[in-house]
Image (spheres, grey):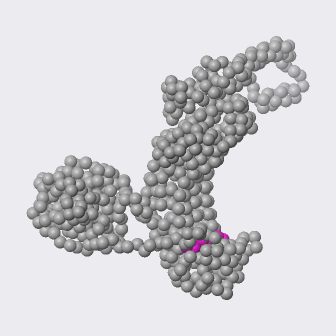
């Protein structure tokens, strides 16, 4: 049995011979018998394929599919007649029973599509039950159900696209279609044929937070994953995302992929990723400019990155500004928008990428001057800049015009309005450029070439420009916690290190039982801030404990009290490596550079051999006082 290509080659070679070998003549004499045998084999195959599909066969294959993966619920779901899987199985049987010429792939794909329908058509979920009380008002069915469940030819159903063979599903697009319920993990059964999932703008479509293992089933095929403005849930960005190694587009904006970190591992290996939108979400703030992890900054194909209205919060749910230094490491990005995301400081002092052409940071609270835009050693030459609604100061540099490469075929946009501390007028050099849009405040635009002024530029709504309150310095000793000189014991090869060298994920000693826990966040982490601390010296060779006055310390009898209440002679709880309780022999106030507040799951940490709390007290007492009455409760944060 030769392939078609090999048969043609063999036939050509034999026909070139001057005399046919006797063996070939004998073979030709057998040709009628061979043709008859071939006809019988082909006929038998058609008969097998043409057998009518029975109910038992269809259900058997569906049960097998359901049990074949680790990410779908087991086949026991069929014991519940109300489960979406049972309803989908029953509907699949109704559509296929008696059909001919339908292989297992057709049965599987149809079952998956019907699972999507029954899992998301007027079905409740935890988000609906928590936030939406009038379910009758929202249970109005899908917006479009064209052909759904009307025919077994699923490739004709609204939002379903198949390959050229009309067999494998390659695209599921059900945008703004009032999908509710839960996105089914059975979609993973489609395997490495599915290229697009777009369920954007189905606000109450939920996805369980810890069930993204189905990503692994389409690791080499899925290119576009868009679920912006849905209720897909995760603790930040799940690591399972990294399994989608062919992914080119990710939109998780305005979803419940929030209230967690942008994990470095989640974006590792996504070398094909070109488009990311994580806007209008909340993520954990990470110190040392790692809120945007290195794996995102190093994505080799990323050209569009959107993170508008993102909040980065600390352990106390306070919004914390992030720096812009990460942008200087993104060598391929063309468009980066992060409007209304709070930023610390001004524009990066390092050169912006030469690839960056469209950059929007309106309403971010940026400070400093515009001179950083002139640092163009990398060839930074934008054509669209939104710098409006910030706190920039100083003049508008005349050399700024040199940054723009405007032309008739490449018009430029520049918006500067809403920066009340900017001085001077728009330089003539900018007026000589071909700006389609050039906006600033009246003071800068008087007698110049602005195309719009102030709020008339339309970049802000009726609420006007954002207001950024000046950050207030914390009261001395309030919430500053430990000095950088403090020593902690880290599990493993690091051993005893200074607090200033502590990193997220380090496992530190937290109790007198030699227990270790990871650092999951910092309430404060500043190498440069100078603050006042109490220096508490105890008997023995251990170093003095330096911490804020309101910080809680564990006494030898198990009580936790503010450091300000500790007196000479008090006994503090020592770590297991010490043989006795730590007796206080001296207390004094000191100034130190560097302030740090690490958080552990238990709320405790051993510092300089003393067991301390992660928390501070709002009142200088062990217990909370209300209306001059002492309660049995503590008031800590």
Could you say where residue 347 lies in the image, as x and y percent from the top left? 52, 73
Residue for point 23% across, 51% down: 511
Q: Quadrant of residue 445?
A: bottom right
**Quarter holding the C terminus?**
bottom left
How many marks can you see? Answer: 0
Q: x%, y% of residue 543? A: 19, 64
Residue closest to the far right:
18
Looking at the image, which residue is at 78% across and 29% down?
4
User: Seen in the image, is 270 located left or right of residue 593?
Assistant: right
Q: Is residue 53 magenta?
A: no
Which residue shows up at 62% across the image and 63% down it?
334
Magenta residues span 383-389
- Is 342 located above or below residue 8 in the figure? below
Q: Nearer the viewer, residue 452 or 326?
A: 452
In the picture, the quarter occupied by the N terminus is top right
Residue 460 in the image: state x and y as whole percent. 59, 69
Residue 192 in picture, x, y percent from top left? 62, 38
Q: Image height check: is 440 above or below 242?
A: below
Residue found at x 68% / y 38%:
145
Q: Is residue 525 visible?
A: yes
Q: Is residue 208 positioned above or below 554 on the image?
A: above
Going by the image, does 498 lie left or right of 564? right
Residue closest to the eye, 637 or 300: 637
Q: From where the camera sits, is residue 399 visible?
A: no
User: In which quadrant of the rendered view does residue 588 lie?
Assistant: bottom left
User: Would residue 92 be found to the left or right of residue 548 on screen?
Assistant: right
Foreground residue, 456 or 184?
456
């Amino acid at each position: 049995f030769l392939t078609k290509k090999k048969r043609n080659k063999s036939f050509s070679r034999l026909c070139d011979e001057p005399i046919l070998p006797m063996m070939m003549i004998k073979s030709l004499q057998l040709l009628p018998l061979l043709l008859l045998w071939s006809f019988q084999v082909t006929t038998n195959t058609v008969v097998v394929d043409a057998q009518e599909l029975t109910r038992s066969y269809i259900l058997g294959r569906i049960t097998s599919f359901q049990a074949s993966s680790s990410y779908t619920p087991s086949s026991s779901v069929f014991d519940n007649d109300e489960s979406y899987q049972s309803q989908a199985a029953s509907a699949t049987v109704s559509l296929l029973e008696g059909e001919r010429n339908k292989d297992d792939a057709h049965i599987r794909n149809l079952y998956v599509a019907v699972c999507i329908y029954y899992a998301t058509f007027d079905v409740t979920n935890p988000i609906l039950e928590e936030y939406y009380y009038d379910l009758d008002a929202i249970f109005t069915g899908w917006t479009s159900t064209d052909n759904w469940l009307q025919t077994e030819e699923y490739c004709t159903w609204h939002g379903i696209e198949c390959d050229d063979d009309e067999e494998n599903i390659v695209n599921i697009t059900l945008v703004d279609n009032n999908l509710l319920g839960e996105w089914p993990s059975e979609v993973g059964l489609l395997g490495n044929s599915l290229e697009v999932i777009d369920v954007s703008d189905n606000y109450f479509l939920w996805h369980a937070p810890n069930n993204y293992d189905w990503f692994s089933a389409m690791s080499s095929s899925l290119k576009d994953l868009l679920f912006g403005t849905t209720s897909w849930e995760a603790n930040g960005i799940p690591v399972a995302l990294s399994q989608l190694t062919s992914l080119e587009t990710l939109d998780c904006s305005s979803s419940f992929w929030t209230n967690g970190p942008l994990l470095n591992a989640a974006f590792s290996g996504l070398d094909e990723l070109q488009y990311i939108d994580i806007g209008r979400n909340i993520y954990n703030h990470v110190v040392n400019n790692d809120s945007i992890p290195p794996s995102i900054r190093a994505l080799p194909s990323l050209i569009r990155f959107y993170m508008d209205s993102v909040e980065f919060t600390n352990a106390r749910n306070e919004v914390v500004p992030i720096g812009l230094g990460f942008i200087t490491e993104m060598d391929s990005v063309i468009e980066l928008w992060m409007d209304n995301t709070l930023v610390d400081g001004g524009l990066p002092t390092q050169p912006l990428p030469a690839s960056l052409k469209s950059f929007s940071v309106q309403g971010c609270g940026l400070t400093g001057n515009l001179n950083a835009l002139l640092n163009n050693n990398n060839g930074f030459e934008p054509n669209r800049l939104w710098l409006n609604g910030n706190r920039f100061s100083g003049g508008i540099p005349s050399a700024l015009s040199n940054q723009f490469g405007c032309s008739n075929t490449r018009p430029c946009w520049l918006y500067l309005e809403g920066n009340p501390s900017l001085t001077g007028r728009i330089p003539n050099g900018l007026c000589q450029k071909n700006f389609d849009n050039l906006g600033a405040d009246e003071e800068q635009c008087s007698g110049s070439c602005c195309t719009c002024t102030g709020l008339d530029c339309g970049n802000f709504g009726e609420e006007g420009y954002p207001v950024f309150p000046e950050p207030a310095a914390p009261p001395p000793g309030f919430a500053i916690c430990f000095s950088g000189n403090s020593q902690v014991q880290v599990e493993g090869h690091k051993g005893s290190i200074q607090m200033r060298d502590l990193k997220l994920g380090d496992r530190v000693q937290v109790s007198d039982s030699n227990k270790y826990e990871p650092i999951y966040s910092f309430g404060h982490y500043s190498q440069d801030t100078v603050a006042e601390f109490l220096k508490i010296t105890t008997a023995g060779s251990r170093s003095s404990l330096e911490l804020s006055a309101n910080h809680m310390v564990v006494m030898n009898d198990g009580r936790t009290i503010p450091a300000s209440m500790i007196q000479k002679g008090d006994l503090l709880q020592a770590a297991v490596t010490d043989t006795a309780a730590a007796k206080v022999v001296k207390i004094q106030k000191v100034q130190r550079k560097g302030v740090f507040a690490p958080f552990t799951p238990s709320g405790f940490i051993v510092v300089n051999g003393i067991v301390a709390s992660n928390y501070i007290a709002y009142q200088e007492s062990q217990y909370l006082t209300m209306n001059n009455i002492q309660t049995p409760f503590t008031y800590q944060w």
